[in-house]
Amino acid sequence: MPNFNIGFKYIALSALVTLGISAYAPVYAQSQQGDKDSFVGVGVYGNGSSNNPSVVFSAPVGSKYSIEGSATTFLDYLVRANGYYHFNERIKVGLGAVHYKSGNFNDTGARISAGYGLVQTDKWQVNVLAGREFVLAESNFVELQLRYKFTDRLSVFYYSQYNSGYLKDEGNLGISYSF
């Protein structure tokens, strides 16, 4: 049985770090001539066998870079963090880290990805990512990211990741607040 208390502590810590980064990043990005959207969100992570609370974030770092991440209490916890270089408003490449913890089992590895913005309007953002996670038995993935903005600050998101390896396909549905 997973120790949810440990998982919630990591989620809370991730949320605090995320809030700090997200609060600072828009100021830094605007000073660098960038105007990308920073947000933090809470939601439900599902993988076909369980649903768990989750935290997601995205923040610009200058005009060409951004960081994104997520944490959930799936297993004991699952944390992903990515740094992206944006070639333009639609194309990005990324490098990141992934950490899984379940009982006495821990595994940390790298994650590489490339993404393309299919739709970028004032209300809708639809992105697709493809990449590979070098953790557990290694797997290729394709991720679809949907985000609808109700207002300039409030939006709903859904991320769906289709995996080729050990992990089942994943989904993350929630609500986010933009800074």
Image (spheres, rainbow, N blue to C red):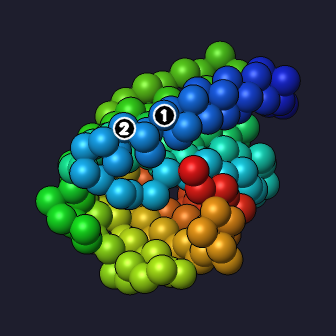
Quadrant of the rendered image containing residue 169: bottom right
Numbered mark located on residue 58 in the image: none
Residue at the image point whose x is 77% and y is 48% from the top: 52
Determine whether 91 is above or below 39 in the image: below
Quadrant of the rendered image containing residue 87: bottom left
Residue at the image point whose x is 25% and y is 44% from the top: 32
Q: Is residue 78 visible?
A: no
What type is the residue that disc 2 sits on? Tyr
From the top left corner, tell me how far across and down residue 128 is, in percent.
37, 71
Determine whether 119 is above or below 85 in the image: below
Query: In the displayed structure, does residue 1 sit left or right of residue 9?
Result: right
Determine whether 144 is above or below 24 in the image: below
Q: CA distance from mark 2 to mark 1?
A: 6 Å
In this view of the protein, which residue sits in the foreground, 156 or 4? Answer: 156
The residue to which callout 2 is attached is: 28
Residue at the image point whose x is 55% and y is 37% from the top: 23
Whether tag 2 and tag 1 are in contact, CB under 8 A, the answer is yes
From the top left corner, tell me how far across and down residue 64 is, in percent.
21, 50
Mark 2 crowdedness (10 Å alpha carbons): few <14, some 14-19, many ≥20: some
From the top left corner, tell me how far across and down residue 154 is, in percent.
68, 65
In this view of the protein, which residue sits in the foreground, 148 or 145? Answer: 148
Q: Is residue 146 visible?
A: yes
From the top left corner, tell me how far across and down residue 105 is, in percent.
59, 21
Numbered mark located on residue 24 in the image: 1
Residue at the image point whose x is 48% and y is 69% from the top: 145
Label 1 sits on a secondary structure element that is: helix
